[in-house]
Amino acid sequence: CRFANAAYASLYGFTSESIVGCTIEEIVGPVAWAEIETQVQRCQGGERVNYLRTHLRTDGSVRMLSIVLTPYLDASGRQTGLLSVITDTTQRWEAERAVRESEERTRKFAAATEEAIVFHCDGVMLDCNDAMTRLTGFPRNEVVGRNIFDFIAPAYRGKALNYTRSASEYLYEVCILHRDGHEIPIEVMGKTMPQHGADYRVVVVRDITARKNMQEREAFLALHDALTELLNRRALLEQLSLALAQARSAQTP
């Protein structure tokens, strides 16, 4: 080392005076030297090198360093050394890592849940989980990029459009179309996520076919015998009341 500023020297526990005369290995330590020796050799060969590496400080904290090695030339153009410029990019690295970890958690959650999850912007689907492909019968590459309203049954598209355009976030019911053409009743909740100047929507979709079938069965059994499936006494009395009312109105027996 022929020169180092105070920031460079203090990074490795030296002063600007005490670091002069030390080799790179003595400055960074044998472990770090084993990692960067190849990069230094490339720069000594005349190449400008840019790389990232982690640095463990004496207080135990880990910093992410961006390092640029540039061949140092004298007045005649002969390489006489190398110039090392170090930028501490820890804050950006930690922010990017937090985003990656958040995205990974989201992917794992979306993969684990049985509920279909869709991300879209202005109706164009950007991503979905496997549950969505199972629900619609379409593979992921035929879902992503399409308009989400293409999958809504025609009778419910107006309702779905109004829900999305108003950025609503309450629970509501519609029907979607399966690939084979049959309708599937679903329960939907959307959430708006403002980001980068656009409003992204995450939509959670739940198949409520079993619930609808149960409700229909309960309504049927309220007026029918469970064994014969014929109308029961309650249905008879309801129909009799209606018939008597019609007879009175028409003044007929």
Image (cartoon, grey):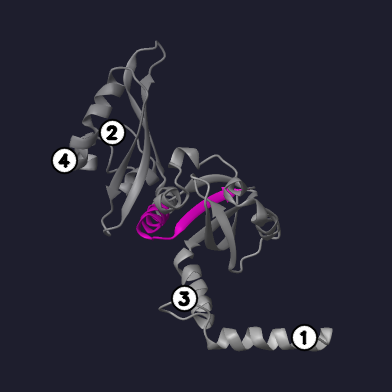
Dot 2 alpha-carbon crowd within 10 angstroms: few under 14, some 14 to 19, many 20 or more? some
Q: Is residue 14 above or below residue 164?
A: above
* Mark 1, secondary structure of its residue: helix
How far apart in space, not on screen, are marks 1 and 3 (Cα)?
Answer: 28 Å
Mark 2 or 3, closer to the camera = 3
* Residue at the image position 60 percent from the left and 45 percent from the top: 150
Observer-nearest residue: 250 or 232? 250
Q: Earlier in the sequence, mark 4 or mark 1?
A: 4
Q: Earlier in the sequence, mark 1 or mark 3?
A: 3
How far apart in space, not on screen, are marks 3 and 4 (Cα)?
Answer: 85 Å
**What residue is shown with label 1?**
247
**In the rendered structure, are the residues bearing label 4 and label 2 in contact, judged by CB atoms less than 8 Å apart?**
no
Q: Is residue 248 above or below residue 1?
A: below
For badge 1, the amino acid type reads: Ala
Observer-nearest residue: 102 or 16? 102
Does residue 116 belong to the magenta stretch?
Answer: yes
Does residue 196 belong to the magenta stretch?
Answer: no
Mark 1 or 2, closer to the camera = 1
Q: In this picture, which residue range is highlighted in magenta?
A: 101-121
Residue 91 is at least partly visible in this image: no
**What residue is shown with label 4?**
30
